[in-house]
């Protein structure tokens, strides 16, 4: 028996149990409701019988609500599909996504560098200074661009 068969068997058993609960409550209600009342019945016996029927009605309502929740869960499984745990296929998919994202980021970096160089060609032979970022230690990365060479970064203290 494979995992899919186990799940479907468990779902069928749960469905049967919920229907069985409803039928049991219904049987108990009909039994209590149709019980013969003797000529010596007291008000206390009638109150106890009424309370038992009310308890059984509350039970059948709860069982029907449980069945509705169960059927809603089945519809969700049918429409969306079951949630799966992380398996070997998920690990492979995650690795593939990471590799693909690295390639995309490399392409974006090349395009960004190419665009910067195109913008700098318009300026001519001027040197441009800029501050790129500040790291945790308070150091800032400063750079100078010369159109004849690639950008170079110099670390400086604020």
Image: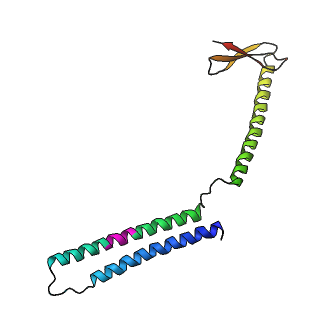
Where 154 sits versus 55, above or below? above
**Residue 24 included in the magenta stretch of the image:** no
Where 121 sits versus 51, above or below? above
Image-quadrant location for residue 21: bottom left
**Residue 59 included in the magenta stretch of the image:** yes
Residue under the image location 27 percent in, 81 percent down: 33
Where 99 sits versus 155, above or below? below
Secondary structure mainly formed by the magenta segment = helix
- Residue 90 drawn at (x, y percent): 69, 52
- Residue 114 drawn at (x, y percent): 80, 28
Residue under the image location 77 percent in, 39 percent down: 103
Left or right: residue 23 compared with residue 122: left
- Residue 66 drawn at (x, y percent): 43, 67
From the image, which quarter does the C terminus lie in?
top right
Residue under the image location 36 percent in, 76 percent down: 25
Give the residues drawn in magenta, as a range: 56-62
Left or right: residue 40 compared with residue 99: left
Q: Nearer the viewer, residue 48 or 61?
A: 48
Q: Nearer the viewer, residue 5 or 145?
A: 5
From the image, which quarter does the N terminus lie in?
bottom right
Q: Residue furthest right?
A: 148
- Residue 118 drawn at (x, y percent): 80, 25
Q: Nearer the viewer, residue 114 or 84?
A: 84
Count the numbered circles shown.
Answer: 0
Left or right: residue 129 compared with residue 58: right
Where 61 sits versus 133, above or below? below
Residue under the image location 77 percent in, 13 percent down: 127
Colouring scheme, one of rainbow, by chain, secondary structure, one colour: rainbow
């Amino acid at each position: 028996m494979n995992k899919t068969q186990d799940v479907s068997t468990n779902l069928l058993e749960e469905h049967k149990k919920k229907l069985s609960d409803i039928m049991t409550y219904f049987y108990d209600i009909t039994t209590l409701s149709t019980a013969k009342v003797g000529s010596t019945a007291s008000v206390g016996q009638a109150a106890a019988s009424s309370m038992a029927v009310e308890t059984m009605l509350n039970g059948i309502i709860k069982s029907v609500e449980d069945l509705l929740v169960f059927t809603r869960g089945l519809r969700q499984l049918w429409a969306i599909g079951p949630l799966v745990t992380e398996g070997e296929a998920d690990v492979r998919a995650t690795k593939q996504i990471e590799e693909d994202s690295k390639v995309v980021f490399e392409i974006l970096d090349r395009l960004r560098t190419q665009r910067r160089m195109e913008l700098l060609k318009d300026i001519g032979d001027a040197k441009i200074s800029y501050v790129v970022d500040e790291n945790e230690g308070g150091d800032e990365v400063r750079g100078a661009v010369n159109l004849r060479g690639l950008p170079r970064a110099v670390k400086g203290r604020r």
